[in-house]
Amino acid sequence: MAIGKKSFIMYIDQRGIFEKLTNEQAGLLIKHIYAYCADENPECDFITGLAFESIKQALKRDLKKFEGIKEKRSKAGKKSANIRAQQKPTNPTHVDFVKTISTNPTVSDNDNDNVNDNDNVNVNKTIKTYSQEVLQTFDECIKSFDDHLHPKTQTKINSWKDTIEKLIRIEKIPPDKIIEIIQKIRSDDFWAKNFLSIPKLRKKNKEGIQYIVVFNERIKHETNQRNNQKGAGASDESIARIYAEKFAKYNQSK
Protein backbone atom coordinates (compact mmCIF):
# COMPACT_ATOMS: atom_id res chain seq x y z
CA MET A 1 0.00 0.00 0.00
CA ALA A 2 1.04 3.64 -0.42
CA ILE A 3 2.97 5.55 2.23
CA GLY A 4 0.60 7.66 4.26
CA LYS A 5 -2.47 5.61 3.37
CA LYS A 6 -4.07 4.55 6.65
CA SER A 7 -7.27 2.93 5.43
CA PHE A 8 -8.87 0.82 2.74
CA ILE A 9 -12.40 0.40 1.37
CA MET A 10 -14.60 -2.68 1.37
CA TYR A 11 -17.59 -2.67 -0.98
CA ILE A 12 -21.11 -4.01 -0.45
CA ASP A 13 -20.94 -6.08 -3.63
CA GLN A 14 -18.02 -8.02 -2.07
CA ARG A 15 -20.40 -9.43 0.54
CA GLY A 16 -21.23 -12.33 -1.77
CA ILE A 17 -17.64 -13.57 -1.46
CA PHE A 18 -17.93 -13.80 2.32
CA GLU A 19 -21.36 -15.44 2.15
CA LYS A 20 -19.83 -18.41 0.34
CA LEU A 21 -17.20 -18.95 3.05
CA THR A 22 -17.48 -20.49 6.48
CA ASN A 23 -17.02 -18.17 9.43
CA GLU A 24 -13.51 -19.53 9.92
CA GLN A 25 -12.60 -18.97 6.26
CA ALA A 26 -14.14 -15.47 6.33
CA GLY A 27 -12.03 -14.63 9.39
CA LEU A 28 -8.88 -15.83 7.64
CA LEU A 29 -9.78 -13.70 4.60
CA ILE A 30 -10.24 -10.57 6.75
CA LYS A 31 -6.87 -11.14 8.42
CA HIS A 32 -5.27 -11.68 5.01
CA ILE A 33 -6.72 -8.39 3.70
CA TYR A 34 -5.32 -6.44 6.66
CA ALA A 35 -1.91 -8.10 6.30
CA TYR A 36 -1.85 -7.32 2.57
CA CYS A 37 -2.75 -3.66 3.14
CA ALA A 38 0.00 -3.44 5.76
CA ASP A 39 2.54 -4.60 3.13
CA GLU A 40 3.29 -7.81 5.01
CA ASN A 41 3.15 -10.02 1.86
CA PRO A 42 1.07 -12.69 3.64
CA GLU A 43 0.76 -16.29 2.50
CA CYS A 44 -2.61 -18.05 2.44
CA ASP A 45 -4.34 -21.30 1.55
CA PHE A 46 -6.00 -21.94 -1.81
CA ILE A 47 -9.53 -20.95 -0.72
CA THR A 48 -8.43 -17.70 0.92
CA GLY A 49 -6.28 -16.79 -2.09
CA LEU A 50 -9.11 -17.48 -4.52
CA ALA A 51 -11.58 -15.39 -2.50
CA PHE A 52 -9.05 -12.59 -2.07
CA GLU A 53 -8.26 -12.18 -5.80
CA SER A 54 -11.21 -9.95 -6.75
CA ILE A 55 -10.84 -7.94 -3.53
CA LYS A 56 -7.16 -7.49 -4.32
CA GLN A 57 -7.97 -5.95 -7.72
CA ALA A 58 -10.37 -3.47 -6.08
CA LEU A 59 -7.69 -2.53 -3.54
CA LYS A 60 -5.21 -1.88 -6.36
CA ARG A 61 -7.68 0.37 -8.21
CA ASP A 62 -8.33 2.36 -5.03
CA LEU A 63 -4.59 2.66 -4.44
CA LYS A 64 -4.08 4.06 -7.94
CA LYS A 65 -6.80 6.68 -7.32
CA PHE A 66 -5.19 7.58 -3.99
CA GLU A 67 -1.78 8.08 -5.63
CA GLY A 68 -3.34 10.30 -8.32
CA ILE A 69 -5.09 12.52 -5.76
CA LYS A 70 -1.93 12.71 -3.66
CA GLU A 71 0.10 13.84 -6.69
CA LYS A 72 -2.45 16.53 -7.63
CA ARG A 73 -2.48 17.90 -4.09
CA SER A 74 1.30 17.99 -4.03
CA LYS A 75 1.46 19.98 -7.27
CA ALA A 76 -1.26 22.36 -6.07
CA GLY A 77 0.62 22.92 -2.80
CA LYS A 78 3.87 23.73 -4.62
CA LYS A 79 2.07 26.12 -6.97
CA SER A 80 0.43 27.92 -4.05
CA ALA A 81 3.77 28.19 -2.24
CA ASN A 82 5.38 29.73 -5.33
CA ILE A 83 2.59 32.31 -5.64
CA ARG A 84 2.96 33.30 -1.98
CA ALA A 85 6.74 33.54 -2.35
CA GLN A 86 6.40 35.89 -5.33
CA GLN A 87 3.78 38.08 -3.67
CA LYS A 88 5.23 41.28 -2.23
CA PRO A 89 3.09 43.05 0.39
CA THR A 90 2.45 46.71 -0.21
CA ASN A 91 2.82 49.30 2.53
CA PRO A 92 1.47 52.65 1.29
CA THR A 93 2.52 55.81 3.08
CA HIS A 94 -0.26 57.23 5.23
CA VAL A 95 -0.64 61.00 4.80
CA ASP A 96 -3.30 63.54 5.61
CA PHE A 97 -6.54 62.56 3.87
CA VAL A 98 -7.78 65.86 2.41
CA LYS A 99 -4.28 67.12 1.58
CA THR A 100 -3.53 63.96 -0.38
CA ILE A 101 -6.77 64.10 -2.34
CA SER A 102 -6.08 67.76 -3.17
CA THR A 103 -2.53 67.15 -4.36
CA ASN A 104 -3.52 64.18 -6.51
CA PRO A 105 -6.57 65.57 -8.40
CA THR A 106 -5.92 63.96 -11.75
CA VAL A 107 -4.52 60.59 -10.77
CA SER A 108 -5.67 57.85 -13.13
CA ASP A 109 -5.11 54.13 -12.69
CA ASN A 110 -6.27 53.24 -16.23
CA ASP A 111 -8.76 50.75 -14.81
CA ASN A 112 -12.43 50.68 -15.76
CA ASP A 113 -14.46 50.76 -12.54
CA ASN A 114 -17.77 49.84 -14.15
CA VAL A 115 -19.70 49.57 -10.88
CA ASN A 116 -23.12 50.72 -9.71
CA ASP A 117 -24.90 50.66 -6.35
CA ASN A 118 -26.39 47.25 -7.13
CA ASP A 119 -22.91 45.74 -7.39
CA ASN A 120 -22.97 45.14 -11.16
CA VAL A 121 -19.27 44.72 -11.77
CA ASN A 122 -17.29 44.19 -14.95
CA VAL A 123 -13.90 42.86 -13.84
CA ASN A 124 -11.79 39.78 -14.36
CA LYS A 125 -13.24 36.75 -12.53
CA THR A 126 -9.77 35.39 -11.69
CA ILE A 127 -9.05 35.03 -7.98
CA LYS A 128 -6.56 37.79 -7.15
CA THR A 129 -4.02 38.17 -4.38
CA TYR A 130 -4.01 41.21 -2.11
CA SER A 131 -1.77 42.57 0.64
CA GLN A 132 -2.63 41.74 4.23
CA GLU A 133 -3.44 45.42 4.75
CA VAL A 134 -6.11 45.33 2.03
CA LEU A 135 -7.59 42.06 3.31
CA GLN A 136 -7.81 43.31 6.90
CA THR A 137 -9.40 46.57 5.77
CA PHE A 138 -11.92 44.66 3.66
CA ASP A 139 -12.84 42.43 6.61
CA GLU A 140 -13.50 45.48 8.80
CA CYS A 141 -15.37 47.48 6.14
CA ILE A 142 -17.74 44.67 5.20
CA LYS A 143 -19.02 44.53 8.79
CA SER A 144 -20.83 47.84 8.17
CA PHE A 145 -22.98 46.30 5.42
CA ASP A 146 -25.97 44.04 5.98
CA ASP A 147 -25.44 40.40 5.05
CA HIS A 148 -27.67 40.61 1.97
CA LEU A 149 -25.41 43.38 0.59
CA HIS A 150 -22.20 41.36 0.90
CA PRO A 151 -20.63 40.39 -2.45
CA LYS A 152 -21.48 36.78 -3.25
CA THR A 153 -19.38 36.08 -6.37
CA GLN A 154 -15.60 36.18 -6.73
CA THR A 155 -15.99 38.95 -9.33
CA LYS A 156 -17.82 41.20 -6.88
CA ILE A 157 -15.48 40.34 -4.00
CA ASN A 158 -12.54 41.33 -6.22
CA SER A 159 -14.28 44.61 -7.08
CA TRP A 160 -14.71 45.55 -3.41
CA LYS A 161 -11.09 44.66 -2.62
CA ASP A 162 -9.83 46.46 -5.75
CA THR A 163 -11.55 49.63 -4.57
CA ILE A 164 -9.90 49.43 -1.17
CA GLU A 165 -6.52 48.70 -2.75
CA LYS A 166 -6.80 51.76 -5.03
CA LEU A 167 -7.96 54.05 -2.23
CA ILE A 168 -4.85 53.07 -0.29
CA ARG A 169 -2.39 52.97 -3.19
CA ILE A 170 -3.61 55.79 -5.44
CA GLU A 171 -5.55 58.18 -3.21
CA LYS A 172 -3.17 57.42 -0.29
CA ILE A 173 -6.05 57.16 2.17
CA PRO A 174 -5.13 55.33 5.40
CA PRO A 175 -7.09 52.11 6.01
CA ASP A 176 -8.42 53.32 9.35
CA LYS A 177 -9.82 56.42 7.62
CA ILE A 178 -11.59 54.27 5.02
CA ILE A 179 -13.10 52.13 7.78
CA GLU A 180 -14.20 55.22 9.74
CA ILE A 181 -15.90 56.84 6.72
CA ILE A 182 -17.78 53.65 5.82
CA GLN A 183 -18.94 53.08 9.39
CA LYS A 184 -20.24 56.62 9.85
CA ILE A 185 -21.91 56.96 6.44
CA ARG A 186 -23.57 53.56 6.69
CA SER A 187 -25.04 54.64 10.04
CA ASP A 188 -26.74 57.60 8.33
CA ASP A 189 -30.46 56.96 7.65
CA PHE A 190 -30.33 58.34 4.11
CA TRP A 191 -27.02 56.84 3.00
CA ALA A 192 -27.77 53.47 4.54
CA LYS A 193 -30.31 53.10 1.71
CA ASN A 194 -28.11 54.60 -1.02
CA PHE A 195 -24.55 53.61 -0.17
CA LEU A 196 -24.80 49.88 -0.84
CA SER A 197 -21.32 48.84 -1.94
CA ILE A 198 -17.69 49.82 -1.35
CA PRO A 199 -16.97 50.46 -5.10
CA LYS A 200 -19.22 53.57 -4.87
CA LEU A 201 -16.44 55.30 -2.91
CA ARG A 202 -14.36 55.85 -6.06
CA LYS A 203 -17.29 56.87 -8.23
CA LYS A 204 -18.03 60.58 -8.72
CA ASN A 205 -21.19 62.58 -8.14
CA LYS A 206 -22.66 64.95 -10.75
CA GLU A 207 -20.15 67.62 -9.74
CA GLY A 208 -17.22 65.31 -10.43
CA ILE A 209 -16.26 64.75 -6.80
CA GLN A 210 -15.50 61.24 -5.57
CA TYR A 211 -18.04 60.03 -3.05
CA ILE A 212 -15.37 59.25 -0.51
CA VAL A 213 -14.47 62.96 -0.56
CA VAL A 214 -18.14 63.97 -0.26
CA PHE A 215 -18.59 61.56 2.63
CA ASN A 216 -15.45 62.77 4.39
CA GLU A 217 -16.50 66.41 4.09
CA ARG A 218 -19.95 65.56 5.41
CA ILE A 219 -18.44 63.86 8.45
CA LYS A 220 -16.19 66.87 9.08
CA HIS A 221 -19.16 69.23 8.71
CA GLU A 222 -21.29 67.25 11.17
CA THR A 223 -18.37 67.19 13.61
CA ASN A 224 -18.12 70.98 13.34
CA GLN A 225 -21.85 71.29 13.98
CA ARG A 226 -21.53 69.28 17.14
CA ASN A 227 -18.72 71.58 18.22
CA ASN A 228 -20.94 74.63 17.57
CA GLN A 229 -18.83 75.82 14.65
CA LYS A 230 -20.04 77.54 11.46
CA GLY A 231 -21.76 75.91 8.52
CA ALA A 232 -24.86 74.36 10.04
CA GLY A 233 -27.46 72.89 7.71
CA ALA A 234 -25.31 72.29 4.61
CA SER A 235 -26.38 69.52 2.24
CA ASP A 236 -24.17 66.88 0.62
CA GLU A 237 -24.20 68.86 -2.64
CA SER A 238 -23.22 72.16 -0.96
CA ILE A 239 -20.45 70.37 0.89
CA ALA A 240 -19.20 69.02 -2.43
CA ARG A 241 -19.31 72.52 -3.95
CA ILE A 242 -17.33 73.93 -1.04
CA TYR A 243 -14.73 71.28 -1.53
CA ALA A 244 -14.67 71.87 -5.30
CA GLU A 245 -14.02 75.59 -4.71
CA LYS A 246 -11.15 74.77 -2.36
CA PHE A 247 -9.87 72.38 -4.95
CA ALA A 248 -9.99 75.03 -7.73
CA LYS A 249 -8.20 77.59 -5.57
CA TYR A 250 -5.47 75.11 -4.87
CA ASN A 251 -4.95 74.45 -8.58
CA GLN A 252 -4.78 78.20 -9.32
CA SER A 253 -2.14 78.71 -6.66
CA LYS A 254 0.13 76.04 -8.13
Image: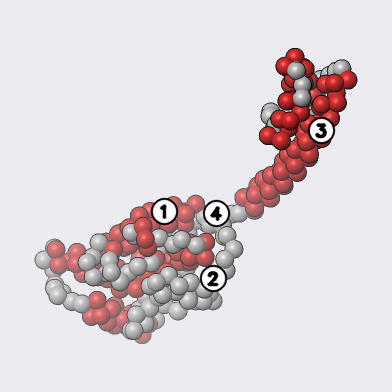
Kindly state the secondary structure of the residue where label 3 is placed: helix
Q: How far from the left and from the top, in percent, is residue 169? A: 48, 64
Q: Amino acid at mark 4?
A: Pro
Q: CA distance from mark 3 to mark 4?
A: 55 Å
Q: In the image, which disc is placed on residue 54?
A: 3
Specify whether 86 is left or right of 175: right
User: On screen, 69 above or below 158?
Assistant: above
Q: CA distance from mark 3 to mark 2?
A: 53 Å
Q: Amino acid at mark 3?
A: Ser
Query: Is disc 2 surrounded by few (<14), some (14 to 19) or many (20+) residues within 10 Å?
Result: some
Q: CA distance from mark 2 to mark 1?
A: 20 Å
Indicate which label's residue lies in the foreground, 4 or 1: 1
**Which mark is first along the chain, 4 or 2?**
4
Q: How far from the left and from the top, in percent, is residue 158? A: 51, 63
Q: CA distance from mark 3 to mark 1?
A: 54 Å
* Residue wearing tag 1: 139
Q: Amino acid at mark 1?
A: Asp
**Which mark is first along the chain, 2 or 3?**
3
Specify whether 163 is left or right of 96: right
Query: Is disc 4 surrounded by few (<14), some (14 to 19) or many (20+) residues within 10 Å?
Result: few
Kindly give the residue lying farthest to the left in the view shown: 228
Snapshot colouring: secondary structure
User: On screen, 152 above or below 111?
Assistant: above
Query: Is disc 3 surrounded by few (<14), some (14 to 19) or many (20+) residues within 10 Å?
Result: few
Q: Are marks 3 and 2 in contact (CB under 8 Å)?
A: no
* Residue wearing tag 4: 89
Image quadrant for the N terminus?
top right
**Which mark is first along the chain, 1 or 3?**
3
Kindly state the secondary structure of the residue where label 1 is placed: helix
Where, by quadrant of the figure, is residue 5 drawn? top right
